[in-house]
Image: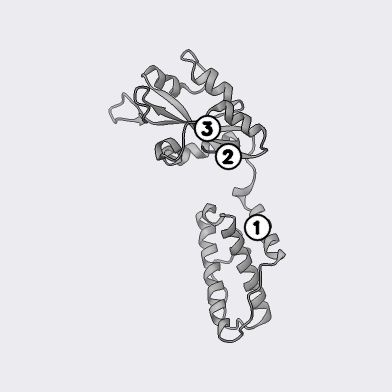
Amino acid sequence: MDSASLPDQPPSLKQPESRPALRVTELASGLLLLLDEHGITGRLPLDARAQASRLRHAVKLTVQATTGTAARPPTPPSATAGELLQAWIAAQPWAQPDPGPVGWAYLLCFRDPATGEHRPLRGNGCRGQFAGHYWGWTDDLVRRINREHRNPNWTGPGRLVQVALAAGLTFELAYVEYPATRSRERRLKNQGGAYRRCPLCRGTGSPLDPVQVAAAVSRLPVARLED
């Protein structure tokens, strides 16, 4: 992260009564309020969250120091704070759009057809590997789910799904992100622990119908759907 935007260490606050220091405090406070209001703080990278925490502590020290010397009414965040936040976010590498075509990133949850409960695919290896979910990407969600994954004779992408079907399992569409690139799908897969993102396993959602999902997204320019 650019050290000029948010310093590693909070600046000296020995004279908070000066006008420049109060102005900086107002801008920093507005920036932190916007981060919290839009739920951005928790999604920042770890180093950015650490810098935001240092900035929050510096603002707290300034407010505490000025409380006894200059009782002034709180100043609402100015437009400059919002512009500062937008410019800072736009400059971060993690905020840049992913290269490549846009499509669907989706999560399949393997289920037991008899009980409807989650049932991982057990591997034949000596270490007992198993797969409970499948991450995939496609530019046509309906075709991929209904015509390819549910076709036992399909030989294209998603070989793991065909192995699960051959083992007597079934699957449900559990989670969808759109728009998403292949890079986004790889990041989701590399994060591991698909159980944490699966609404079916967590008991917070029901299976998604790819036809209904595609129809809903066609009416919304940007959507992330989790039933």
Q: Which residue is mark 3?
A: 106
Q: Amino acid at mark 1?
A: Trp
Residue 138 in percent (x, y) is at 58, 27
Q: Secondary structure at mark 2?
A: strand
- Bin the neighbour count of mark 3 within 10 Å (Cα to Cα): few under 14, some 14-19, many 20 and up: many
Which residue: 63% across, 34% down? 217
Confirm or deny contact between disc 1 and disc 3 (CB under 8 A): no
- Classify mark 1: helix, strand or loop: helix
Q: Residues within 10 Å of mark 1 (few under 14, many from 20)?
A: some
Say which quarter of the image contains residue 169: top left
Question: Percent x, y for residue 152?
Answer: 46, 14
The residue wearing badge 2 is 224
Question: In the picture shown, does residue 131 fall above or below 29?
Answer: above
Q: Secondary structure at mark 3?
A: strand
Mark 2, mark 3: which one is toward the viewer? 2
| Residue 180 appears in the picture as rendered | no
| Residue 180: % across, % down | 60, 36
Instruction: Inspect the image, locate mark 3, and give the three-letter code of the amino acid beneath it.
Output: Tyr
The count of marks equals: 3
CA gap, disc 2 to disc 3? 10 Å
Reading the image, the residue beneath label 1 is 88
- Give the mark nearer the N terminus: 2 vs 1: 1
Q: Earlier in the sequence, mark 1 or mark 3?
A: 1
Cα–Cα span, label 2 and label 1: 24 Å
Q: Nearer the viewer, residue 166 or 211?
A: 211
Q: Give above or below for 107 relative to 68.
A: above
Look at 41% across and 28% down and name the residue there. 110
